[in-house]
Image (cartoon, rainbow, N blue to C red):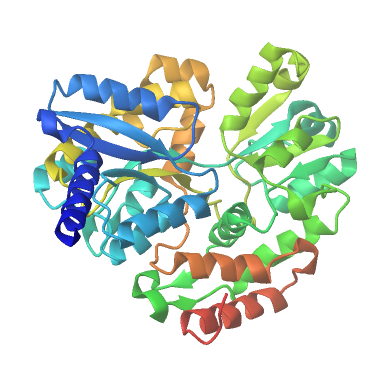
Amino acid sequence: MRRSTRLAVAMLLAGLSLAACGGDDDGVATLVWYTNPDNGGQATLAEQCTEAAGGAYRIETQVLPNEADAQREQLVRRLAAHDSSVDLMSLDPPFVAEFANAGYLLPITDEARVATLTEGVLDAPLETAFWDGELVATPFWANTQLLWFRRSVAEEAGIDPRADDVTWDDLIDAAEATGGRIGVQARRYEGYMVWINALISSAGGQIIEDADQGADATPTVDSPAGDEAAEVVDRLSHSSAAPADLTTAGEEEARSLFQSDRGSFMVNWPYVYAAAKSEVDSGALDPSVVDDIGWARYPRTDAEHESAPPLGGINLAIGAYTHHPDAALDAVECITSAESNAQYMVESGNPAARRAAYDDPAVREAFPMADLIRDSINEAAPRPVTPYYGDVSVSVQRTWHPPRSVSAPGTPEETDAYMSEVLAGDRLL
């Protein structure tokens, strides 16, 4: 009976193993792509690249949770268990260094492949794709925030948000003078870190130095740039221009405020324009609101430094334990091509990582601000590229929240002390 039981278990495990191969028994490599949620654009690209492969491979998609932290957690658990079914993954740029440092990503070392996968990629997204001198991910789509403004409010306030030297103080002055509210993301989540990083970067600073040194990196929020960033948060949070839901506001709360009668200015991702047009089509929003929307480069923190817009997006990485590395590389080339970038930008509203996509007529029709998006992404400031990014981000979020508690120099000083203890292992998050 023991021999029979062992045989039955062995047969069961063999069956599970075959099932995990996802159809490889027919000679076609099956690649599982873990995607971030979207409107189906990644699934469409998977179908198209499968067809273009001519039987060399097929791509199946699995959708990750909505929140970036939950996406990271699911992928880490699978890769820590050496799960070979994670062939491809849509990965937030801040997590690339952590995954690569842990050995979870397949480095791309062939010079010809590297040249193909990086050709024409905008500068800032490309910075997030390397770790320890090796290409470990390929920018799939990129993102940045723009300054969105209600034309009528700007005219009433006598301000031109498209001027090169517009600062946060200028916007707060204009909103206060017109009774408007400014939309930002200040909930204690990654979106708040995006705002703080952009404020500090736009003042010529950075959150940490020598980020690639991991736990030995040096926190540098306590700096003139950090103080200027804190002063912006402090002033807005105590201003009549602050939204009532400032401490709980994310992207959608900011968008809703901006489209209301109290809307004046907002920093947010380009999807907001397509979302507003969609609401007009459904009858949920008056067309006059869309006609009143203008756009400009991200505002300056101070008059002396050009703004450094935020960087977002998704990189496409290959799992280190895949059984099909060559097929996965072929799939990455197809999914991240300029043609795929342009198609995905139009269908999903997520901006392209490759420069050539912005010349596509369909992109330019859907995004009248295409040139501004491209240039902002190219000149954006990535969040710290470090394998300890989670610790860095949470340290900032905790010490800068709620926004009304922020002050200079106290908050930057507290952040550096807190982060130093976390990186040294002397404090638990």
**Which is nearer the eye, 285 or 287?**
285
**Which is nearer the eye, 131 or 239?**
131
Q: Is residue 174 above or below residue 56?
A: below
Residue 81, can we see it? yes
Residue at 76 percent of width and 21 percent of height: 289
Q: In the image, 238: left or right of 221?
A: right
Residue at 22 percent of width and 61 percent of height: 133
Q: In the image, 52: left or right of 421?
A: left
Residue at 74 percent of width and 68 percent of height: 406
Residue at 21 percent of width and 34 percent of height: 30
Q: Is residue 235 above or below residue 411?
A: above
Residue found at the very far bottom of the displayed protein: 426
Q: x, y (%) of residue 171? A: 75, 45
Q: Is residue 156 above or below residue 346?
A: below
Q: In the image, 3: left or right of 76?
A: left
The image quarter in which residue 203 lies: bottom right
Q: x, y (%) of residue 198? A: 57, 55
Location of the C terminus by quadrant is: bottom right
Q: x, y (%) of residue 157? A: 83, 36
Q: In the image, 256: left or right of 343?
A: right
Location of the N terminus by quadrant is: bottom left
Number of labelled discs?
0
